[in-house]
Image: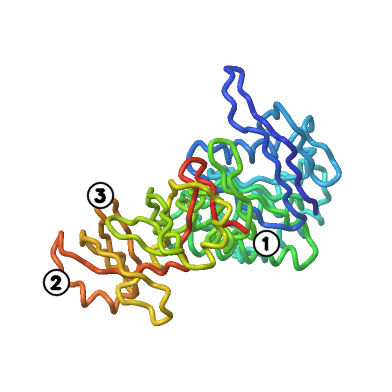
Amino acid sequence: MAQVSLRQIKKTYPNGFTAVHGVDLEIKDGEFMVFVGPSGCAKSTLLRMVAGLEKITGGEMWIGKKKVNDLAPKERGIAMVFQNYALYPHMKVYENLAFGLKLSGISKQEVDQRVRHAAELLEMTHLLDRFPKQLSGGQAQRVAVGRAIVKKPEVFLFDEPLSNLDAKLRASMRVRLTDLHRTLRDSGQAATSIYVTHDQVEAMTMGERICVLKEGRIQQVDTPTALYNRPANAFVASFIGSPEMNLIKTNLHQADGQIKVQLGTTQLALPATHTARLSNNKAADVIFGIRPEHIHFHARSQGDSLPLETTFRFMEHMGAEIFLYVSLGDTPLTVRMPAEEAEALAQLERGAPVQLHIQMSACHLFDGQSELSLLQP
């Protein structure tokens, strides 16, 4: 078991392009850390540098008490699960799991013990005599994970391992991998895991902490709940959450002893908690953020919701809830509400006025220039 330390890690290619800009990150012993971000944000590059598959051009990489910058992948105590499972087609599952161990000179008895233990953990003992062509996508994925487990590494690395599976199978494999990580950790085995994905739903459901990346720089590292409720900037706010947060470029006004935000033709007063945090802020241009579930069709009884006139565009029925799409002038807004509220909207035609209510205590404000949160404590 080991922690992973990235200290001012940089990656610059021979043509001068810098993909990773001085990343500092501490991954705790036994933690499940997720790297998430859009395509091209360098999350896979960062993972490959941990693995030793990409050369580090600046900074220090530590796994446990070892500085690994110049160590070969096999000397780093890592095991990697790729997007492409790369199973040997001419070998049965048992042999696929055992092959690397046999090359390492481990005794036949120890190999058999490790293989069967991994098969039990992954509930695939019945698959040991099958060839890869006889496996489903989910079964092949489990074999790839099992091949990592038998190595007993200090750190597990996962590079978008579920992206080739259908939506239903991805959901079940998320649960299986998360449960496996906790089982290994609770039993005292190596469990430090770094998992790369572009899917923020995967990140939110699997990660104990999430590292959000953009253009080779860390935007925020925190728990899923903290990222969702307290995003550090507008990028994190828009990337984490589905549907994404509504973001509106606007400005603030001082009036009647209150700070008000301009939304369309309406000025809405910010709650006292927000006003107190803005006391030292002089920014007039801001980005106003509100999650789709914090816009309501009916006013909330708590009294912290304020009315806003919008224009109906269309609706999506999602079963237990609906996504309502409206516009505020030229700005589109997404609203998430219980399906039972859809009846009142069923007869609306495109362009019809709709009065909604914004839960102001749940709103976010970001600086219009830096896009950093103005409400962080």
Type of residue at label 1? Answer: His
Cα separation, mark 1 vs mark 3, equals 47 Å
> Along the horizontal axis of the image, is 40 left or right of 252?
right
Cα–Cα span, label 2 and label 1: 49 Å
Crowdedness of circle 2 by 10 Å Cα count: few (<14), some, many (20+)? few
- What separation in Å lies between label 3 and label 2 (alpha carbons)? 23 Å
Residue occupying the point 73% across, 63% down:
184
Residue contact between numbered discs 1 and 3, judged by CB atoms under 8 Å: no
Instruction: Identify the mark nearer the N-term, 1 or 3.
Output: 1
**Residue 240: horizontal and vertical position, in percent?**
49, 55
Which residue matches tag 1? 181
Q: Upstream in the sequence, badge 2 or badge 1?
A: 1
User: Can residue 90 be seen?
Assistant: no
Q: How many labels does the image show?
A: 3
Q: Nearer the viewer, mark 2 or mark 1?
A: 2
Q: Which amino acid does label 2 sit on?
A: Gln
Using the image, tell me which numbered label, if any, was put on residue 317.
Answer: none
The residue labelled by disc 3 is 330
Q: What residue type is labelled 3?
A: Asp
Tag in front: 3 or 2: 3
Could you tell me which quadrant the C terminus lies in? bottom right
Judged from the image, the secondary structure of the residue bearing numbered disc 1 is: helix
**Mark 3 or 2, nearer chain start:** 3
Residue at 54% of width from left, 36% of height from top?
A: 215
Q: Name the residue under label 2.
A: 347
* Left or right: 138, with 300 as reference point: right
Pick the front one: 171 or 261: 261
